């Protein structure tokens, strides 16, 4: 019998969930758990569960922009700051300073906030107070601010300390060297030529034909033994370059993304880490019968987010960061790996120019982003295991590595080797080793991630404010203007044309002194084309039957 005063519908205690819990509700609901079960588990009403699921898009967008998991685990609302432009400017400034290794104090933050406010929202009432700073830190998961000290410089003492810490992590997690990776971005001017003498009247930047449209960002990643070089990620300006017309992008030898300034962004890096990096690493470990765990070493670029975000669902594949004052002297990809890749790419450019026997201007006009992608992928495949091993020697102890010279950059492709190829090109005048060296170094400082001055941060915040109410139609097809000289046929290559071309190639190579592997690959291609041809014929007959009888 019920106790006196008891109510059949006792009032439920009000529960306010964190954003992390709301995201978990969405995941469980998508996995098939019903609304009633979720309501009981989290102690909330059924309608609240439905509202959370309905708000899925906004919650996921907030999660994507979060600077660390602490933000989503502690915050309970997505309420934005009253001064949104100031907020965006401040977090961009803060993350950039943190990546540079500049200690930031509370007063420093307050002064910068006041400065940004005066330029972004003049006349509006705002005070950079300790209360505002507390809320700013809480909104973005900033745990602490450095109070004293000066900007650190790269030095061997800090590198030694980092190596000691890294060794402890490897021992604690029982990792093999095959399970330790490094990734880094770099910019490449893929269409520059090694001379100032060739200029086209349509090019305002004639020196080597370098324009912003000729730039891509490349993400290189490999493990400490050099046995696993991940598929490259290439970021170009155009979403749909004309050179990609009528091709299956999945067949490109790299993962291609687009961004209007060709920079790596948080969204692209996040997708690379979870959808490209983790699956490739897991496959390599499985094939080589290694435990499914790994460590990815990164620099402190703001696009790399927080190490609490960058980890696999099971927590076995994680990220760790170089201290800012160690990155330039310790990060393996910067110790000759990326530069060797670029040298191979530029050697290929010279070889192609020599073999095509074309004048440099015509060659430059016809060179397109697809050619560059294949050249970049080939260059990456040429980088030797030993070069990558040597690059890791500064931070790890590796066995069976030849003695490392101070200058390992030229160990694979020397400047003179490229200059010798250039000297055989009769139409390329005035190109010597010095010109080639300048050509190789033209994008040495292109790191693939953008840094901003305070003026640029303010300008970007103002631009975002202007665009916030506009309808953005930026996702329409774009054509890469670099390819304006390239002729394309609008018709698709038929199966018959492909088969004829394949037969011609087989006939040619059978008369050459070449390995059987090449002929076998061509025979496989021929078999693939025939299967496509047969499938197309069946579909045509089936369509004709339905047209006739239905």
Image: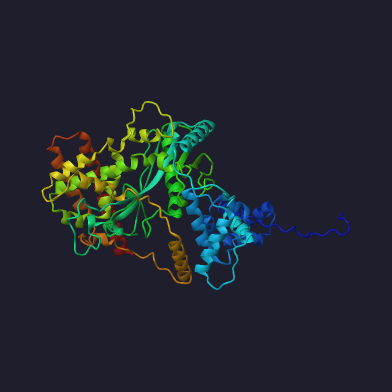
Indicate left or right for 375 with 12 as reference: left
Q: Based on the displayed image, in which of its 4 quarters is residue 406 positioned?
A: top left
* Along the line of sight, the residue nearer the viewer: 443 or 101: 101
Q: Is residue 347 visible?
A: yes
| Vertical comparison of 462 with 390: above or below | below
In this picture, residue 43 sits left or right of residue 257: right
Task: Indicate whether 235 appears above or below 114.
Answer: above
Residue that protrudes farthest toward the top in the picture = 400
Q: Camera-side residue: 11 or 549?
A: 11
Side (left or right) of 131 relative to 61: right
Q: Position of residue 238 (x, y in %)?
A: 33, 59
Q: Position of residue 489 (x, y in %)?
A: 21, 60
**Residue in view at x 56 percent, y 72 percent:** 124
Location of residue 262 in the rendering, given as x and y in whole percent from the top left corner: 36, 56
Going by the image, does 366 lie left or right of 445? Answer: left
Displayed quadrant of residue 545: bottom left
Quadrant of the image containing the C terminus: bottom left
- Which residue is more in the foreground, 188 or 374? 188
Which quarter of the figure is the N terminus placed in?
A: bottom right
Residue 509: x, y in percent?
Answer: 15, 40
Looking at the image, the residue that sits furthest to the bottom is 123
Q: Is residue 280 visible?
A: no
Q: Specify the farthest residue to the right.
A: 4
């Amino acid at each position: 019998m019920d106790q006196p005063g008891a109510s059949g519908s006792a009032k439920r205690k009000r529960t306010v969930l964190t954003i992390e819990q709301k995201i978990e509700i969405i995941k469980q609901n998508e996995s098939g758990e019903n609304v009633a079960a979720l309501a009981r588990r989290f102690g909330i009403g059924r309608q609240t569960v439905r509202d959370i699921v309905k708000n899925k898009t906004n919650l996921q967008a907030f999660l994507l922009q979060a600077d660390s998991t602490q933000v989503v685990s502690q915050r309970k609302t997505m309420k934005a700051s009253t001064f949104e432009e100031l907020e965006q400017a401040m977090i961009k400034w803060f993350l950039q300073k943190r990546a540079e290794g500049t200690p930031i104090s509370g007063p420093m933050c307050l002064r910068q906030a006041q400065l940004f406010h005066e330029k972004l929202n003049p006349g509006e009432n705002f005070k950079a107070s300790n209360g505002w700073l507390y809320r700013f830190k809480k909104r973005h998961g900033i745990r602490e601010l450095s109070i004293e000290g000066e900007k650190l410089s790269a030095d061997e003492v800090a590198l030694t300390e980092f190596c000691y810490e890294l060794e402890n992590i490897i021992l604690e997690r029982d990792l093999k060297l095959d399970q330790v990776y490094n990734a880094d971005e770099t910019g490449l001017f893929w269409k520059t030529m090694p001379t100032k003498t060739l200029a086209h009247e349509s090019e305002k930047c004639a020196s080597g034909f370098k324009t912003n449209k000729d730039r891509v960002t490349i993400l290189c990643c490999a493990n400490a033994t050099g046995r696993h070089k991940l598929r490259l990620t290439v970021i170009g300006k155009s979403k749909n370059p004309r050179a990609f017309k009528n091709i299956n992008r999945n067949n490109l030898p790299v993962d291609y993304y687009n961004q209007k300034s060709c920079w790596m962004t948080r969204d692209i890096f996040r997708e690379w880490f979870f959808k490209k990096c983790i699956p490739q690493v897991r496959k390599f470990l499985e094939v080589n019968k290694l435990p499914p765990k790994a460590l990815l070493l990164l620099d402190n670029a703001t696009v790399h987010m927080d190490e609490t975000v960058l980890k696999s669902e099971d927590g076995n594949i994680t990220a760790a960061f170089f201290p800012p004052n160690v990155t330039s002297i310790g990060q393996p990809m910067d110790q000759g790996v990326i530069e060797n890749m670029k040298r191979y790419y530029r050697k290929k450019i010279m070889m192609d120019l020599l073999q095509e026997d074309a004048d440099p201007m015509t060659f430059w006009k016809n060179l397109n982003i697809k050619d560059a992608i294949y050249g970049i992928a080939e260059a990456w495949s040429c980088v030797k295991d030993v070069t990558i091993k040597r690059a890791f020697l500064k931070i790890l102890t590796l066995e069976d590595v030849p003695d490392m010279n101070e200058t390992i950059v030229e160990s694979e492709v020397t400047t003179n080797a490229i200059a010798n190829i250039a000297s055989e090109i009769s139409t390329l005048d005035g190109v010597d080793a010095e010109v080639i060296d300048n050509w190789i170094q033209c994008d040495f400082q292109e790191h693939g991630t953008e840094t901003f001055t305070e003026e640029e941060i303010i300008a970007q915040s103002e631009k975002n404010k202007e665009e916030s109410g506009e309808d953005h139609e930026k996702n329409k097809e774009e054509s890469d203007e670099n390819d304006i000289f390239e002729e394309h046929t609008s018709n698709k290559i038929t199966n018959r044309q492909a088969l004829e071309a394949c037969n011609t190639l087989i006939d040619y190579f059978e008369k050459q002194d070449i390995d059987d592997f090449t002929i076998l690959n061509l025979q496989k291609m021929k078999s693939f084309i025939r299967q496509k041809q047969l499938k197309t014929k069946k579909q045509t007959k089936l369509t004709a039957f339905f047209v006739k009888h239905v």
